[in-house]
Amino acid sequence: MLGFSGRLDPLLRRPFSIHNVMPAAGVAEAVELLYKVVGKATQTLCQQQPGKMVNLLGPLGNGFRIPTDARRIYVAAGGIGVAPLLFLAFSLYHKNIDPVDCRLFLGGRTKDDILCRDDFLKLGVSVITTTDDGSDGDQCLVTQPLEIAVEHCRPDIIYACGPEAMLACVVGIAEKNSLPCQVSIETMMACGMGACLGCAVESRLESGKYWHGCVDGPVFDANLLKF
């Protein structure tokens, strides 16, 4: 979670995914963030000068878990939801898992929302794009080519990050085909410690039970969440 020292507006930190790490001599010395300017906090962030101090709390919660026997991996991203998935892709290859088939299904409203394609291609990840207006890839929801791919060539696991409606559809595809699925939810966090309840998400396992995105997530097994 990122804040700005000495500023009262925005007062609270904002949650960001780790997009990448910058290693030096085998040690991670910095993290890279990918974000879209949508409000005051991200506007402030894009105005920061090199060397300017920011307030960082993290890493928090749980990340993606990678089965050692996964060989065919499908990843679905909606818009800026692609941010944590590049780090996931790097982790796959740095852990020598060497999947035989790793595909990214990347969707956005327009071609301007199709991000990081070349970064994934350099890792050997196949990229299938869709846009709402047809300006890049097929004109459809990103879950449509994902569902077709699942039916034709069953993966070992699905990972996803994006808007809630997209995640609900991805989870539905995974359940229909009895596939393990992990999703990274996009929810606002304030304290980052599970105290403020601002990132509470409803559990599917027990009525009235809630998970905290900052402590229990932001990555969850799909069967834990109620969409």
Image (cartoon, rainbow, N blue to C red):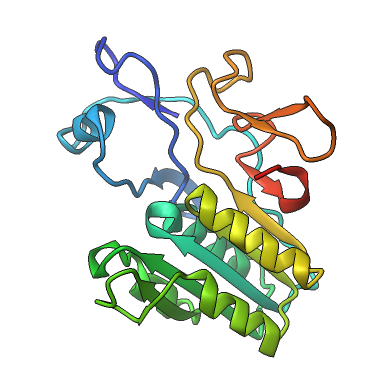
Q: Is residue 216 shown left or right of residue 47?
A: right
Residue at 15% across, 34% down: 47
Q: Residue furthest bottom?
A: 152
Quarter of the rendering containing residue 118: bottom left
The x, y position of residue 110, in whole percent, is 26, 66
Tell me: residue 34, above or below residue 210.
below
Q: In the picture shown, does residue 156 fall above or below 45?
A: below
User: How far across and how far down the image is residue 43, in percent?
Assistant: 20, 34
Q: Is residue 139 left or right of residue 166?
A: left
Q: Nearer the viewer, residue 107 or 3?
A: 107
Return the residue nearer the eye: 118 or 187.
Answer: 187
The residue depicted at 53 percent of the width and 76 percent of the height is 144
Closer-to-camera residue (111/202): 202
Residue 130 x/y as whole percent: 39, 75
Name the residue rendered at 63%, 20% in the picture.
194
Question: Residue 160: which quarter of the image?
Answer: bottom right
Q: Looking at this rendering, what residue extends furthest in the right direction?
A: 206
